Image: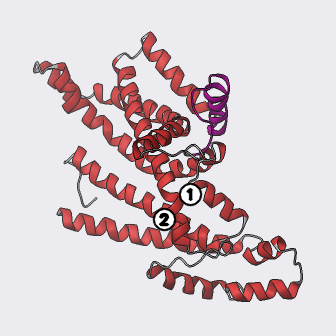
Amino acid sequence: MDRLGFLTGRAARAVLILFGVIVLNFVLLRLAPGDAASVLAGDQGAADPAFVAELRHDLGLDRSVPEQLWIYTKSLARLDFGQSYRDQRPVVDIIAERLPATLLLTLTAFGFALGIGIALGSIAARHAGSLLDAVLTGISVMFFAMPLFWTGLMAILLFSVWLNWLPSYGMQTVGEGGSDLSLVGDVAVHLILPALTLGLFYMAIYMRVTRASVLDVLDRDFVRTARAKGLKPGLIWRQHVLRNALLPIITFASLQAGQLIGGSILIETVFAWPGVGRLAFDALMQRDYNLLLAIFFITSTIVVVINLAADFLYVAADPRIEMGA
């Protein structure tokens, strides 16, 4: 199958998966107890059933679930996410304000975790059984075992409270002015702790996967043959070992894209990072369906696109893989 046919097939699957996620998220939210009308009425101190019923009618919540789903999917086809029940603002505007912060946090943590994890895993594999391997393996187990919120709190305690090296919350210093360069530096300093906290957990995973994958490839016949031919160790490592060892890492990284976004909810809460993760938590507590569904749709789309990209990386890493498989 040619590349265009491969792309079309994978894209069609991605659209079907995304549609299934949309329907599932919508139904599950509607089955949850409580709704936006009850929350809004409680905030206004009005428990009158007539007032709550009027709110439900105004918000369209008194219709049947299939009818609400049909209206929602028609709006979604036009990329119309509606308005936030609570803020009475377009959902797109609210998410647009928060999404860059989440992408900055997750992409930084992902790049750190993947790069450092692969590097340390490769080093551990090349020195398997040595003291260095034992130390690196112990470090990876330690960071994997510690919950994200605990790591974040300990990082705040150490680097913010005791050492006073880094800020403990927010994305930038309140009232900070100055040039664009100083603003970038301020955001970068605030990013260090949350990105490291999120990245260290996944770095431990990628390190263990890389170590196991490299050790498996080192025992393959084609590596022994390359050594017997007298090829340089560096060439063998780059062209034969790492290239084949990366295949399971690509799969693992694509599958964990959704977990990385989910983990950002905890990190954004601990560090008061103004991202989509914290916004989703607040929207859930307030039963702001339109806002929550839009967040689910955008994050699901990101995960599906990442998995689609992983399919192409697989083919690039190993052209022997059948594109039609």
Give the residue displayed 77% in from the left and 70% down from the top: 33
Residue at 59% x, 35% y is 167
User: Considering the numbered disc 2 on the image, is that residue within a helix, a strand or a loop?
Assistant: helix
The dot on residue 298 is 2
* Residue 29 picture location, percent across and down: 66, 71
Magenta segment main secondary structure: helix
In this rendering, position of residue 250 left or right of residue 150: left
Q: Which residues are magenta?
A: 147-170
Q: Is residue 287 above or below residue 318?
A: below
Which of the two labelled residues, at mark 2 and mark 1, occupies the earlier sequence position?
A: 1
Q: Residue 276 bears which disc, if any? A: 1
Question: Dot 2: within a 10 Å radius of its alpha carbon, few (fewer than 14), some, or many (20 or more) residues?
Answer: few
Give the amino acid type for the residue marked by disc 2 in the picture. Answer: Ile
193 relative to 132, above or below? below
Q: Is residue 312 left or right of residue 193?
A: left
Q: Nearer the viewer, residue 208 or 115?
A: 115
